[in-house]
Amino acid sequence: MRSSKTVFHGLVEEARICATCGSCRSVCPVYAEIGWESAAPRGKITLAKKIFVEGKENFLSEQYVKRVFQCTLCGSCAEVCPARIDTRELWQEMRQAITDRGKAPTVFNQIAKNIHNNKNISANTNDGRLDWADDLDDPECIEPSETNEVGYFVGCVASFYPMVSEIPLSFVNIMDINNVKVTVLGTEEWCCGFPLLAAGRNDEALSLVEHNVLKIGQLGIKTLVTTCPSCYHTFSHHYPKVIGKPLDFEVVHATQYLSYLIEQGKLDWSEYEELDEVVTYHDPCDLGRNSGIYDAPRNTLKNIPGVTFVEMEHNRENALCCGGGGNLQAVDPELTAAIAESRIEEALKTGATTLVSACQQCVQVLTEAARRKKARIQVMDINQLLWMGWE
Amino acid sequence: MLDQIKQDFGSRYTESYFERQFYTRDLAYIPNFLVSLVAKPLPDMVVRPVNAEEVSRIITFASENNIAVTPRAGGSTAVGSCVPTKGGIVVDLNGLQGVISFYPDDEKVRVLPATTWVELDSYLRQKGYCVCSYPSSINVATVGGWLSGRGYGMGSIRFGSLVEQVISLEVVLPSGVIKRLTRETDPPLQWFAGSEGTLGIITEVELKVRPIPETMGHYLVVGENSQAVLQAARECVGELSGIIHNMHFNSRLLNHALKRKGLTEDKLGDYHSLAIDLEGSPVSLARAKEFLRWVVDKYGLALMDPEVALEEWEIRFQSLRIMRVYPCLLGSELLIPVNSFHNYLQQVEALGRRAGVEMLTYGHIVSRDLTIVMTLYCSDERQTWRYLCDTSLMMEIYRVGRRLGGVPYLTGFWNTPYVKDIYSRKKLRELKRRKTLLDPGGIMNPGKVYGPPLLLQPNLYVLGMKTLGLLRRILPKGVQNHAQQ
Ligand SMILES: Cc1cc2nc3c(=O)[nH]c(=O)nc-3n(C[C@H](O)[C@H](O)[C@H](O)COP(=O)(O)OP(=O)(O)OC[C@H]3O[C@@H](n4cnc5c(N)ncnc54)[C@H](O)[C@@H]3O)c2cc1C
Ligand code: SF4
Ligand code: SF4
């Protein structure tokens, strides 16, 4: 949960409630890069008042639509809003309202088409869901068995993009070496629906939600682990709303699960080769600010033998965004790149050798930013770092 | 020369209508047709300089071409201070952000003017220091913006208004000259405090900071009788001013309204409340606690549970959550003597009862003598005439305050009809002298501070407001207030 007690009662009411005080402006990563008031959350709501409250549709210009979708859904604005508006929800509803008017960026059509046809965001069919698992020492360790207490929801990006396939590999290897059985859904894993929700296509996400809930139930999964914070957030926050009741299974992020295993003494460190890394941690927005999970990744990192942990200036609920959320990369890749580079600069100031996150999207955009800046820092997911000592 | 500016600023210069429209307002919502009768709020261009030299180039250009310049930073005032009245150039200062250098041994820092208070304080806290005082709009208000106003807020009881902490300034004068000011220079830095961007642009601030206090203690005094609560407040300011960080009063009506929406502790809803946040050594805090207990007994008040007091402290920046009760609020912000606060509250609430609205009041006690008081009431911006008629109550609130020695907190544009109340004749003459001396062409933030435009001349203004007040009584009620809920 967010640390501030935000509320959301629909676009029209919340747009009226906004006092245009501008507190959100100062923390917005998009505004920080673009610099015009039109790019600040306050600016976007100022026009939303006209369009959605006063019904002045002529203000719904192409430039405005562009600004609305230039947003990572990082939730920083909600964190500081003194009127307690859950602005993240507001942006999603605004996107939906724009989509309903047929004015959303066309780039989302391709994503939606992929999901519709393939049940995942890539251009590949869902048969390839488990291609990444070919590189496991024992690819069968994730197959369904008699007891499937713990399920692993891999997520589309980790499943289909080789650049980040080390994340599910590391997670499963860690589980396997510590004799913790996890089961995957394989081709029955469909996109969690987040890209559609973020694109303002809530209705289209419905069948995905229903399918995933059904399949998870059929396997008898009691605890569903995700390595993707957006899958985690979508399952824990949106699924119960969509199906109209609490889920029958618990949803945890991999960092929570690892922290739990460490606390329970279930990780076997006897063969672990001590690392020698100064590590700083980048809070993924959907895990930190938007879900309130700050301690689990830190507990995990601090327990890894040979890791010296340092914080960046902006951390936990004040963490800067990586720029990769909210489908921004699809809409405006240059903006994503600029935001990511600012985060790399902050990480470099800590003197860390490794920048760790707990999200495949953060890892991907931060890796590219570090490469562009020729920064002497390696970027990886927390599972990759942990696995290094057992590898 | 404009071509040169366009070329130099590149993507930091705009004439696009889409971009400019966002600079036509601040917090206050005033219907366009009304604004256009008295001002031209749409700038012709907006520029975003990143250093003093760039600011100087813009001002020189404006000065040579007699173009109005409106400085804007957080844009978080509600009296039109940072909104153009004559089009021209808006200088968006948010590119001048960050700490330049910090001198822990001298307990001072040099910052760029658009650094927000929260950024500055977080920066210092990582080094064991903090700012002396800050506005409750900490997340948006900038160092330069707050200095350009009255500079009162949290920490003011101990450290005075912001200008008292300022050691030096770098400013760009209306001539384009970049100058460093201290208390001894000509002009002295004090001229810029409260000048609301009318004398030039502040491009750097050097100010005192302090080590993080050893401990803090949070108390919440409640009572049914506002007089008793406010007398207790005065007694505490007298005795504890050296360790008070913040003292904030909420009227019972306000607490009750918040309670209705679950926005405050249920227990608080039936009382007037006084949050007292102390800072200092454990010994001084322990003594203060004894004193507080004594005061609370003396006035027949009660101390809320520590958890409730702590919660109030943690949400101290969320005064705008009242918008969840009434999404459209009008109001007046005044600086009034502490010892008039109780009478003010009684009279303003009586005004509310007569007018059929719930008057919600809170106050920050900022010195032994002064309180910033905000009184808000509900309206509905979707019903333009209703809304306009409701604005007449702002003048009524102000008149209550004036009778009790109060003045509007900021002048900006919308309070210029009151300028002769805000400043004595002598002080106003002196302010005008400074303005003429530094800005003979009158390019800097015209229309603000020194006097109203024709249609806002006091006589016309009062007549207009009274007419709206009369209309208010005969118009259908629209969205009603809930004074009795
Ligand atoms: C919830 C809330 C709480 C508030 N609490 C307080 C409070 O406790 N105390 C208080 O005093 N105010 C308070 N305010 C009002 C406002 O936030 C402050 O006055 C704030 O300091 C204004 O700063 P800004 O950066 O937003 O300035 P702006 O609104 O951008 O500008 C204010 C004025 O300063 C001028 N200006 C800005 N920067 C410069 C510069 N560098 N050089 C020259 N002129 C400049 C502008 O032209 C304008 O006249 C509050 C507002 C809100 C919404
Ligand atoms: S912080 Fe909240 S109330 Fe203030 S402008 Fe942003 S959304 Fe509106
Ligand atoms: S969610 Fe993040 S990127 Fe989007 S408006 Fe809010 S602060 Fe900006």
Image (cartoon, helix red, strand yellow):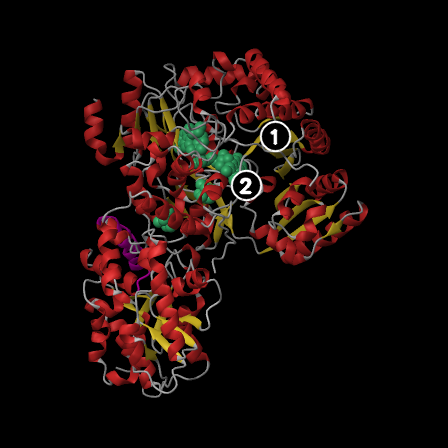
Which chain's residue wears label 2? Answer: B
Q: Amino acid at mark 1?
A: Leu
Task: For residue A128, say whether it is visible.
Answer: yes
Range covered by the magenta-colored residues:
A334-353
Q: Report which quarter residue B215 is drawn in.
A: bottom right
Residue B52: x, y in percent? Answer: 31, 33
x 19%, y 30%: residue:
B7
Which chain's residue wears label 1? Answer: B
Q: In the picture provided, is B200 more to the left or to the right than B350?
A: left
Q: Which residue was labeled with disc 2? A: B323
Q: Which residue was labeled with disc 1? A: B335
Q: Secondary structure at mark 1?
A: strand
CB at disc 2 and ligand 2 closer than 8 Å: yes
The numbered mark, 1 or 2, whose residue comes first in the sequence reads 2
Towards the viewer: B203 or A154: A154
Residue A181: x, y in percent? Answer: 36, 84
x 38%, y 48%: residue:
A91
Q: In the picture provided, is B15 more to the left or to the right than B458?
A: left
Q: Amino acid at mark 2?
A: Met
- Please state, as top left, top right, bottom left or bottom right, where the C terminus of chain A lies in the image: bottom left
